[in-house]
């Protein structure tokens, strides 16, 4: 049985904190059970996710299911950077607020989202990011955006590469209700030394390191 580590995503006291804790444990087990039963989720490398302290999970993005998969593999809340239109959708807005998710413009030019991410990391958040900036329709890893590198360098937090496989881009009903076998691979943290967040070449190098680390995990996938 996995050991969970409750972390706050907003200051709470008394019964409100107890309610938030109960909701986290309930939501986590429901999501984990759903992923294990319906998608036969296999997890490799979960020991690399820290039980406390801030870190950034950087993952490939191939379906609407990806945030649920990562959340099922993490023993802590993961606060995702999520497209603003999805964050504001009524069906999932409650979950986004509960997880402390950060809405971001798809253009990638969103200074407010960067500031919110840095504030969350300073408070010990576990931040989930998809460096590609959107779902890869063909399943291949796309060129990364530099926003994630900027957040990592400014925060000084380690980045943890993640690779998802076994599913692909489909319609919403097919994504959540067609059974499949999914695998999530989590790699060793990437530590950044000697890079400058104000330097464009540094941002480009860190962005390449992110995509290279995710691709390295992808290369471990056995061919079908």
Image (cartoon, grey):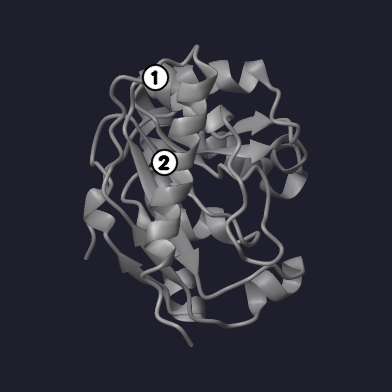
* Residue that appears at 64% across and 81% down: 178
- Disc assigned to residue 80: none
Q: Is residue 114 left or right of residue 152?
A: right
Q: Is residue 133 left or right of residue 210?
A: right
Furthest-top residue in view?
Answer: 198
- Give the labeled residue for mark 1: 155
Q: Secondary structure at mark 1?
A: helix
The residue nearer to you, when weighing 148 against 117, is: 148
Furthest-bottom residue in view?
Answer: 224
The residue nearer to you, when weighing 47 against 2, is: 47
Do we see residue 149 in this rendering? Answer: yes
Give the crowd class for mark 1: few <14, some 14-19, many >=20 residues within 10 Å: some
Q: Position of residue 105 (x, y in %)?
A: 73, 30
165 above or below 21? below
Q: Quadrant of residue 32?
A: bottom left
* Residue that appears at 73% across and 35% down: 84
157 above or below 189? above
- Give the labeled residue for mark 2: 209
Q: Position of residue 212 (x, y in %)?
A: 43, 50
Q: Secondary structure at mark 2?
A: helix
């Amino acid at each position: 049985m996995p050991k969970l580590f409750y972390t706050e995503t907003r200051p709470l006291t008394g019964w409100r904190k107890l309610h938030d804790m109960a909701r986290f444990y309930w939501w986590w087990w429901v999501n984990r059970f759903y992923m294990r039963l319906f998608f036969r989720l296999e997890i490799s490398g979960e020991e690399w996710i820290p039980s406390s302290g801030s870190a950034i999970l950087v993952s490939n993005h191939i379906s609407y299911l990806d945030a649920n998969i990562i959340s099922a593999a993490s023993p802590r809340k993961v606060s995702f950077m999520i497209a603003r239109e999805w964050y504001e959708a009524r069906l999932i807005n409650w979950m986004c607020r509960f997880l402390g998710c950060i809405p971001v413009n798809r253009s990638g030019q969103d200074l407010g989202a960067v500031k919110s991410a840095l504030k969350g990391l300073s408070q010990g958040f576990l931040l989930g990011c998809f460096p590609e900036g959107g779902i890869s329709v063909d399943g291949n890893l796309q060129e990364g955006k530099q926003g994630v590198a900027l957040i990592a360098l400014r925060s000084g937090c380690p980045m943890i590469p993640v690779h998802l496989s076994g599913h692909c881009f489909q319609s919403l009903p097919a994504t959540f209700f067609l059974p499949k076998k999914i695998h999530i691979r989590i790699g060793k943290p990437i530590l950044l030394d000697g890079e400058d967040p104000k330097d464009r070449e540094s941002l480009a190098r860190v962005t390449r390191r992110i995509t290279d680390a995710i691709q390295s995990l992808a290369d471990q996938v056995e061919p079908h």
